[in-house]
Image (tube, rainbow, N blue to C red):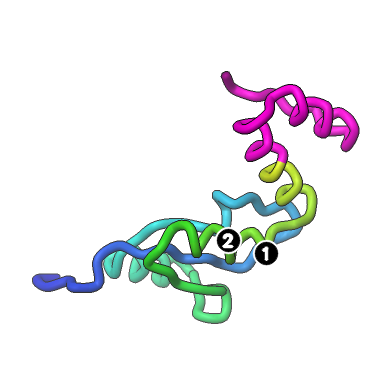
Amino acid sequence: MKVNEIGKFWVVTKAGKKSTLADILFETGVPGIMKQALGGLTIPEVQGVFKSKVKAEKFAKKFLPKTANTIAKVNILYKKDRKLAKKVAAVLGYKIFFKN
């Protein structure tokens, strides 16, 4: 490809029962999405295409299974209040090991 004015973009795909955000959200460009299609990605599997990572993540989180979504929220909470995040994780029955 000689000219690519599109640049990079974010793709959200359908989620499975155990999908995580990393499973359903990825950044790519035109060559990358062509490779994904050759690898088996179909149009019905694509839930959305975004230029903004923030918008793509917000959209993708709607499709995640409840447990993965809850863990993601606990991880976000951890960045704000570590003690509270650990208590919430314990109440929910999660054994989450946070990186410092």
Going by the picture, which residue comes out furthest to the bottom? 44
Q: How many marks?
A: 2
Mark on residue 58? 2
Classify the position of the N terminus by image quarter: bottom left
Q: CA distance from mark 1 to mark 2?
A: 7 Å
Q: Amino acid at mark 1?
A: Lys
Going by the picture, which residue comes out furthest to the front? 80
Residue for point 74% across, 30% down: 85
Asked if marks 1 and 2 touch (Cβ < 8 Å), the reply is yes
Residue for point 67% across, 53% down: 19
Circle 2: element type:
helix
Mark on residue 62? 1
Mark on residue 94? none
User: What is the x, y in percent for residue 58?
Assistant: 58, 61
User: What is the x, y in percent for residue 55?
Assistant: 50, 64
Q: Is residue 16 magenta?
A: no
Residue for point 9% across, 71% down: 2
Q: Amino acid at mark 2?
A: Lys
Residue for point 52% across, 65% down: 12
Q: Main SS type for the magenta part?
A: helix
User: What is the x, y in percent for residue 28?
Assistant: 35, 60
Q: Nearer the viewer, residue 13 or 79?
A: 79
- Asked if 98 appears above or below 33 in the picture, the reply is above
Q: Tell me which corner region of the image, top left, top right, bottom left or bottom right, holds residue 88.
A: top right
User: What is the x, y in percent for residue 98?
Assistant: 65, 24
- Asked if 46 appears above or below 83 in the picture, the reply is below
Q: Which residues are magenta?
A: 74-100
Q: Is residue 89 magenta?
A: yes
Q: Tell me which corner region of the image, top left, top right, bottom left or bottom right, holds residue 33.
A: bottom left
Classify the position of the C terminus by image quarter: top right
User: In the drawing, does residue 14 fall left or right of residue 65?
Assistant: left
